[in-house]
Image: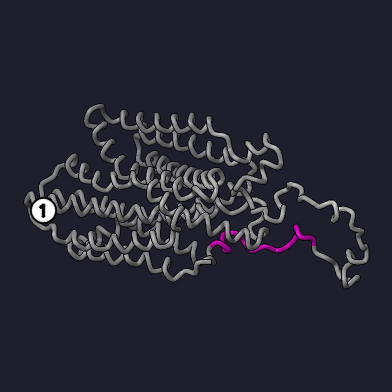
Amino acid sequence: MLLSAICGWVADHTSNRSIPFYTGLIVLFLATLLFGLAQASWVLLISRLLQGLSAAITYTVGLALLVDTVGRNDIGKWMGTALSSSSFGLIVSPLLGGIVYAKAGYMSVFAMAMSLIVFDILMRLCMIEKKTAEKYQSTEEVHQQNGFYGTFTDNGSNGHQQTISPAESQKPVNDSEQDPLLSGAAVEPASKKTRMPTILILLSMPRLLAAIYGIFVNVSILVGFDGVLPLYVKEIFGFNSLAAGLLFLCLAIPALTGPLVGNLTDRVGPRWIAVAGCSLSAPPLILLRLVDHESLHQKIILCVLLTICGFTLILVVSPVAADLSVVVEEKEKADPDVFGPGGAYAQAFALFNCSMAAATFFGPVAAAAFKERFGWSVMSAAMGVFAISGAVPTVSAPVA
């Protein structure tokens, strides 16, 4: 969480986002290997810190690369694909890890994880960054693309020459008009203009803050189930770890509809879809309080309510992530020099990642604390109210 902002700044100021992305994947591979081989607590601590560092890099740079590549018209669909895949993996990975551990042993779990990382690196080798591809295209083709990398270029500020009409090119230049009105005053070059730090500019934008809070609420609720659901179903139904893990499929399978939600976001806009997702999540969360004793009927109710929660919560992820990139785009169009030549997508998604990281800590702790102190019924009601709170900033934030 603490390093996400730094990783975002580095990604926005490097000429090639591939370098930090590869670095993050390699660090993740080494951290996973170290975790599997650890024999002491301090080694486990170091490996977890390295995993956190790698997550900060790969999430931040990966989402920025996605925005660079797909353009505004399809950002919702592809952001939905990426983040729903992330949500699906977050939910289903404990179940897969438990099955592999039971069947093949401890190190097999880490071998599976490291194989996925190697596959990720190989897939990344097949990808060509849009910025790199533009070097092999004509200037005319580049101007026709709806790119996102760096500041927006409506005024030709991206380094390509502006088209000048013949009439304009033959216009005489009045030297006197080029002189400063106050000849004794020093004119500050545009490149030396004092600029507010990008992070502070981003944090002053209400729509961006609404998106960050929306994903915080979403992830907090999802991971909050990790802290309370397995223990509660063991207490009520006598479920073992496998049965409790299978329950999470009720949340995981709806996450696969993320691309469809993203498509809808591209068509109708993110605002009211996100509001609907937060608002519709409240009833099934509050109704979880009905599950309070052992019976087949109660098990069916639990599965149905969790599935509904899965479908409503996925309505939040794609819209808030898509709106994050749109907000940065609109800010750059209004003031092309506001973020400097590197743009601000990586730093915006660094804040997004910070919010997700904070949620993974807050969600289980808060849910477990409410469950322990007030009971399951109060905890489910609190989750429902918390879900509604995610809609409030989105509704109140100005559209433009």
> What residue sits 12% from the left and 50% below the top?
299
Q: Residue at x 87, y 72 (%)?
A: 181
Relative to 351, say whether 145 is above or below.
above
Is-magenta flag for residue 193? yes
Residue 159 or residue 96, whichever sits in front: 159
Relative to 196, residue 229 above or below:
above
Which residues fall within the magenta stretch? 189-202
Q: Residue furthest left?
A: 295
Asked whether the viewer can see residue 361, the reply is no
Q: Secondary structure at mark 1?
A: helix
How is the model colour-coded? one colour
Q: Position of residue 235 (x, y in %)?
A: 12, 51
- Give the camera-side residue of 326 and 170: 170
Nearer the observer, 353 or 131: 131
Q: Residue at x 24, y 50 (%)?
A: 307
Q: Which residue lies at the image location 36% right of the left edge and 31% below the top edge?
A: 37
Q: Is residue 320 left or right of residue 61?
A: left
Name the residue type under label 1: Gln
Q: Is residue 194 magenta?
A: yes
Which residue is the site of mark 1?
298
Q: Residues within 10 Å of mark 1 (few under 14, many from 20)?
A: some
Residue 293 seen in the current view: yes
Residue 389 image point, x, y percent: 35, 67
